[in-house]
Image (cartoon, grey):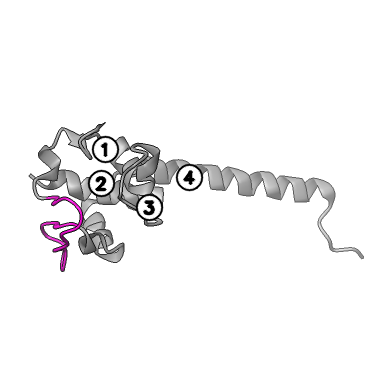
Amino acid sequence: MDRRPSFSSSVALQALAAGCLAVAASCAAASPADAARGRLLLTQYQCGACHVIPGVAGARGGEGPTLVAFGRRSYIAGQVPNRDDLLARWIVAPASLVADTPMPAMGASPRDARDMAAYLRTLR
């Protein structure tokens, strides 16, 4: 007796898996940003090597601008409106918003960037 799944059950399993992934992705996208996690991620991504960031251990860098009171700023890098979505995009790919920025892309995932942005926006 052949115990391999038939074509139709294989297709059904693939469709079920795709549906589960879509639900998981939408739940992840809908989950609120986590500022506490973002504070920890700022350490992990070593943002403090270049920036002074209140509340982040060892964040005493002097190469980049200080991020003290960042949440009160109107603009990111003096050019991009300081909004949650744009700040997260900035963290992931700064040159996509300001072509000649010295800030490097550090390999942050969109979720990590969203959480880091949430923390930075708390700095008043």
Q: Secondary structure at mark 2?
A: helix
Q: Residue furthest front?
A: 100
Residue behind mark 1: 84
Q: Mark 2 to mark 1: distance in Å? A: 6 Å
Range drawn in magenta: 51-67
The numbered mark at residue 68 is none
Using a 10 Å C-alpha cutoff, classify the residue at mark 3 as few (fewer than 14 neighbours), some (14 to 19) or many (20 or more): few
Q: Mark 4 to mark 2: distance in Å? A: 20 Å
Residue at 40% over, 42% down: 29
Left or right of 80? Residue 17 is right
Residue behind mark 2: 117
The numbered mark at residue 105 is 3
> Which circle's residue, 4 or 3, is located before the other in the chain?
4
Amino acid, disc 3: Ala
Using a 10 Å C-alpha cutoff, classify the residue at mark 2 as few (fewer than 14 neighbours), some (14 to 19) or many (20 or more): many
Q: Quadrant of residue 57?
A: bottom left
Residue behind mark 4: 25
> Which circle's residue, 2 or 1, is located before the other in the chain?
1
Amino acid, disc 2: Ala
Q: Quadrant of residue 26?
A: top left
Using a 10 Å C-alpha cutoff, classify the residue at mark 4 as few (fewer than 14 neighbours), some (14 to 19) or many (20 or more): few
In front of the other: 18 or 12? 18
> Which circle's residue, 3 or 1, is located before the other in the chain?
1
In front of the other: 43 or 102? 102
